Image (tube, coloured by chain):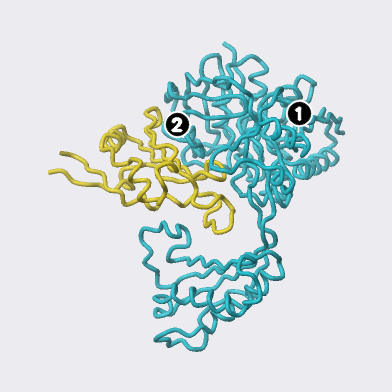
Amino acid sequence: MSKEVRLYDLAKVLRSKNAGPFELTLDIIFDDQESYETVKRSNVINRDLVCRLYRVRPEEVYHVVSFDAARAIKITIRRPVDSGGIGDTDVYGAQQHAPLIDVMIPVGG
Amino acid sequence: MKEMRILSPCGLLGYGFPDASFNKGLERNPDVIAVDAGSTDAGPQKLGAGVGIVSRQATKKDLLPILTAGQERNIPVIIGSAGGAGARTHVEWSMDVVEEIVRERGFSFETAVIYADVDRDYLHQKLDENRIEPLGPVPDLTHAAIDDAVRVVGQMGSEPIIDALDHGAQLIVAGRAYDPAPFAALPIRSGFDPGLALHLGKILECGALCAEPGTTKDAILGYLRDDHFIVEALNDSRKCYTTSVAAHTLYEKGHPYILHGPGIELDLSECTFEQQTEGTVKVSRSRVRATEKYAIKLEGSSQVAFRTIVIAGVRDPILIENIDEITRGVVSQIRDDYREVPQSDYEILFHIYGKNAVMGRLEPDGKPGHEIGVLMEVVASTQELANAVCATARSTMLHYPYAGRKSTAGNLAFPYSPSDIQCGPVYKFTVYHLVEVEDPCELFRTEYRKLG
């Protein structure tokens, strides 16, 4: 029986931050190889998901890329509003990871 | 084996660090103390208004042990992005603190002050020559944007700092700099591998954020060798792990292993992170490539509006349930009250804490808590208009009627009187571009001063 686990529970680090004033970067980092491989292989974290969760167009998703040496997946998107601009809600972009929390990852088989 | 030891006291000058960690770093006989003092993270207001990220008092508190160690040990002290945004006004603000310490303590330093402000005529000329391009999702630069910017800085690479070291500077106070540059300058000058030096600099510039538990308020030490470097946390309660150091490599960068800097591209795709001892991590195979053209990042900030805000709480459940309808009603009431003012002259924004203030329209939950915080924000073309609209909107919301209302005496719990907070000018990064240069130092002006 396969089951699903929240990304928030699998990841050691789930964070967001400015990458400059116009981009937002989201890091998903794992402290064990198995969780990293599970999430990477599931291919749940992809451009379509990012477009849906962050309401950006595909061309506004600059990177969805994994980095084996850090057991990390990085997503970089256009910031909805530039940092400190009128209408911005998070100048450092430090609390924009919430839409990823409940992403479900199939585990086991 | 060649080795150079680089001490980073904290992640941002003025954030503070424990004496014990810094002293432990000094016991390791560092060859240089370097510290990053800036960031664009605090938004365009720092550059636009010419203000710092930290207080003068906090800066002085941090600088005192750093300058003392530099003086006593006769090792270089290098400060990058002085004063936060690293423009002339920020550099001078930092130098004022440095000079005060030098006077009080009787120190003496051969000092280099490197200004990063970019001349408007230079920018106009570069724009005409087609040598300025947007960095990321920003519009093409225009002559009007150059003129409108309060100030523009260029982000220096290691070269102007190396040049200052060549001139015998012991203390270098640099304006806006690529974060790793102050850490990498001395090692690159001494012939160490620039890829390793810059990668190490990228890790050290945030202080102990690469350790666990991570913080910017603590010291960290890097040992740079021929074909690797080692990162060591200096506080017994923190350890560097392969995961924490690797994680920090990709911190606040768009791509995890291709990192861009002035004239360079770091390629960390082949990097290895190994646990050296308990708490120290060894990193190898960081590579750097010189870019085909040498480009420097420009940052410029313009004043775009004025802001006034009100903070209030709401506890009534019916009111909370109807909050969106109420805020929409307040806005339309204000539009009517100020019908003689063009609508484009002002904007009213509501941030409803406890519901969706952090994520806005991206909030996946949005179910409000038992109480909510209302941050009402008015941005307008003048401060006077922002104040006026904010005051009217506040009183309108305080007494706004809605269906099923039971708490008829007032809708808002203000924590303060006066309730309205004037925030002053609002800024925007209107210059965020790359300029192609002939010489990595051409934008930067270095002044040599003998202090003390």
Q: Mark 1 Cα within 10 Å, few/some/many (few <14, many 20+)?
A: few
Viewer-nearest residue: A12 or B444: B444
Residue B58 appearing in the image: no
Q: Note whether B290 is above or below B136 in the view shown.
A: above
CA–CA distance in space, label 2 to label 1: 34 Å
Question: Residue pushed farthest top?
Answer: B1
Chain identifier matching the yellow colour in the rendered picture: A
Q: Which residue is mark 2?
A: B246
Quadrant showing the N terminus of chain B: top right
Residue B30 appearing in the image: yes
Q: Earlier in the sequence, mark 2 or mark 1?
A: 1
Of circles 2 and 1, which is in front? 2
- Taking the spot 39% from the left edge, 34% from the top edge, the residue there is A65
Chain identifier matching the cyan colour in the rendered picture: B
Q: Position of residue B313 (x, y in %)?
A: 51, 74
Viewer-nearest residue: B366 or B214: B366
The amino acid at mark 2 is: Ala
Q: Note whether B339 is above or below B234 in the view shown.
A: below
The image's mark for residue B72 is: 1
Query: From the viewer's perspective, is B171 left or right of B281?
Result: right
Query: From the viewer's perspective, is B325 left or right of B40?
Result: left
The amino acid at mark 1 is: Glu
